[in-house]
Image: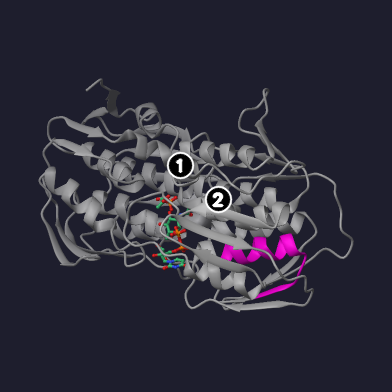
Amino acid sequence: MVAIRPGSPLTGSVTVDGSKNAALPLLAAAAALRRPVRLGNVPTNTDVETMLTLLQQGGWHAARSVNDPQTTLILPSDQSQPDLAPEVAARIRASYYLVPALLGACGRARLPWPGGCDIGARGMEQHFKVYERFGDRTTMDDRGYFVEATARDSGTVSVMLPFRSRGATVAALLRAVVEGRPLRLGQPNLSPEVLSVVEALRTAGWESRFGENTLSLRPPVIPSEESVSWRVPGDKIEAGTLACAVAVTGGEAQILGVRSGDLAPLVDALRLLGFPTEADDGTLTVRARGARPTGRSLQAVASLDPGALDADFEPPLMALALSLPGTHLFADAINPGRHGNLLPQLTRLGAKIHELCPTECRITGPQRLSGAGVEATDIRTGSALAIAGLTAHGVTTLGGLEQLRRGHADLPVKLHALGADICEVIP
Ligand SMILES: CC(=O)N[C@H]1[C@@H](OP(=O)(O)OP(=O)(O)OC[C@H]2O[C@@H](n3ccc(=O)[nH]c3=O)[C@H](O)[C@@H]2O)O[C@H](CO)[C@@H](O)[C@@H]1O
Ligand SMILES: C=C(OP(=O)(O)O)C(=O)O
């Protein structure tokens, strides 16, 4: 566990890791492509390490470069095998991204129900609808699901998603890649993580177009087996978390290595609250020293719509808002169990939170928090508690670091580098 105490304002600069949630589908895309892929800026958090283990189990060569451990080489499978160790695959949500690659390599995929953050019912019936549109047979039981490729057609596959699921969008893209078929996808998820996959496929010769309501993909005119190089974008959520930590302490810092466009809703939120914030040329600058909170009401509503607030920004913003004047609204109906994880932990620090319903709450600040023992019950609950601990009077001990490390290789180290009073303690 780590112990956190309030201290001086966070200052300096720090570089974020590659994004876990972009790295996971890019690794699966590399496996689906059946060409050598050199992927740079691959973070070392445990979910990504789990994904690399799964690729190796499936027969792919997936290894970090000795000279540059952030670069991973993924080579096509010659000895594929579709039955990945269920206890490993069940650790992460993103094991479901491997279905298309396994279908391409073995014609079938058997996986356990996905794990990952325990933040409410997390269905995947839209993935199965996607596979069925490609002619695959799907079966499921208590332990997991089985997908089998049956059809060998070549025309365009059209799929209309009922909502903008990131997982189902990636499933459709990668299934089209494996089958070499054009895809027309209605109501796609257009998050930066999905667009990173689209961009990567373009470098491999796939044509793609998208507007707000449709995403289309076409195979390369001349297929190639040459290697391609991709790069995982910087982690927007890690950057946003660090920005909230800087703001809560009244500090001033530069957070490097993240694309400015990925941060627009977070930057808007910080500015609305009164923190001068710029995102330019891969650098997020937060100047909270001497900043006057506006007292304006933040409405942090998680959404899957293009350009809207990513659900994973909501917890760090909630931790920040507790220290600010005004009445602020928070909602995450995408992950219906998130508040059930986060709110009781913040309450242990003395936060007064008015729950409007299980997925919506109102906070009126500023509130004075007191240090206590808390638990990272999911990745973003962990990072929000680290932020809250920076202002809570006394010592906050944060346990459950294995959850935090699933998404961030070393968030406490980065906070320490900015001057936070945070250290690892043996319980
Ligand atoms: C690995 C990864 O990138 N995880 C992110 C991804 O999760 P996740 O992979 O769950 O995201 P999706 O966009 O696919 O799904 C969002 C929600 O829709 C529901 N759903 C989805 C598909 C389906 O077939 N049926 C169904 O019911 C689930 O309740 C799910 O929680 O997006 C969430 C919301 O932006 C983020 O909080 C997670 O950090
Ligand atoms: C919810 C998250 O991850 P996962 O979907 O992998 O559980 C997350 O990254 O915050």
Q: Magenta stretch mostly in which secondary structure?
A: helix
Q: Under 8 Å from ligand 1: the CB of mark 2? A: no
Q: CA distance from mark 2 to mark 1?
A: 23 Å
Q: Say which residue appears at 15% left-offset and 64% top-offset.
A: 355
| Residue 238 appearing in the image | yes
Q: State which quarter of the image contains the C terminus.
A: top left
Q: Indicate the quadrant of ligand 1 in the picture.
A: bottom left
Q: Say which residue appears at 53% left-offset and 55% top-offset.
A: 96
Q: Which residue is mark 1?
A: 87
Q: Is residue 177 magenta?
A: yes
Q: Name the colour scheme.
A: one colour
Q: Position of residue 263 (x, y in %)?
A: 47, 55
Q: Is residue 160 above or below residue 40?
A: below
Q: Which mark is residue 22?
A: 2
Marks counted in the figure total 2
SS at badge 1: helix
Q: Position of residue 97 (x, y in %)?
A: 57, 55
Q: Is residue 270 above or below residue 162?
A: above
SS at badge 2: helix
Q: Say which residue appears at 57% left-offset and 46% top-offset.
A: 23
Q: Is residue 157 left or right of residue 89?
A: right
Q: Which residues are magenta?
A: 169-184
Task: Tell me which corner region of the image, top left, top right, bottom left or bottom right, holds residue 386.
Answer: top left
Extreme-top residue of the structure: 426
